[in-house]
Image: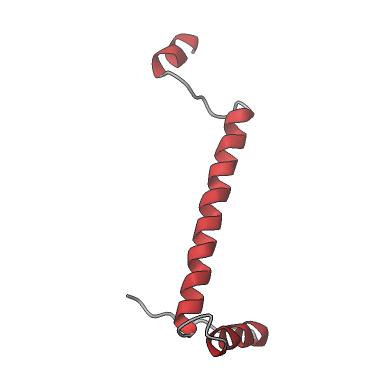
Amino acid sequence: MTTLSVPLPEDLTKFVDDMVRNNKAENKASVVRRALYRLSEEEAINDLMEAHREVDEGKILSGDLDELVKNI
């Protein structure tokens, strides 16, 4: 596991400290890890939604490869 040192503004530092103080997280590192996992999930969902939009807009070919080749 890698350790990162990231400067945080005062409001985020207070949020992290409050999460630990209120027993909503085991420690500061777990707060940051949870936030990064959620950001990662959000990005994956956004990528999937964008791919669906591109298919709907006809920017991406979809379907049977043999049929697509015939049409090209």
Number of callouts in the render? 0
Q: 31 and 25: which one is in front?
A: 25
Determine which quarter of the picture holds residue 7. Answer: bottom right
* Residue projecting furthest to the top: 70
Q: Position of residue 54 (x, y in %)?
A: 59, 34
| Scheme by which the image is coloured | secondary structure
Q: List the single residue furthest toward the left.
A: 1
Q: Position of residue 72 (x, y in %)?
A: 49, 13
Task: Name the residue: 51% across, 78% down.
Answer: 31
Q: Position of residue 33 (x, y in %)?
A: 46, 73
Asked if residue 2 lies left or right of residue 70, the reply is: left
- Residue lying at the far right in this picture: please name it: 11
Q: Residue at x 50, y 81 (%)?
A: 25
Q: Look at the picture and state if 19 lies above or below 61.
A: below
Q: Tell me the residue at 46%/16% (across/down).
A: 68
- Left or right placement of residue 57 versus residue 30 in this view: right
How far across and how far down the image is residue 35, in percent?
53, 70
Q: Is residue 43 left or right of residue 70?
A: right
Relative to 70, does residue 17 appear above or below in the rendering?
A: below
Task: Name the image quarter holding the N terminus.
Answer: bottom left
Above-or-below relation of 43 to 68: below
Which of the two residues, 36 or 18, is positioned nearer the viewer here?
18
For the view shown, which residue lies furthest in the front direction? 23
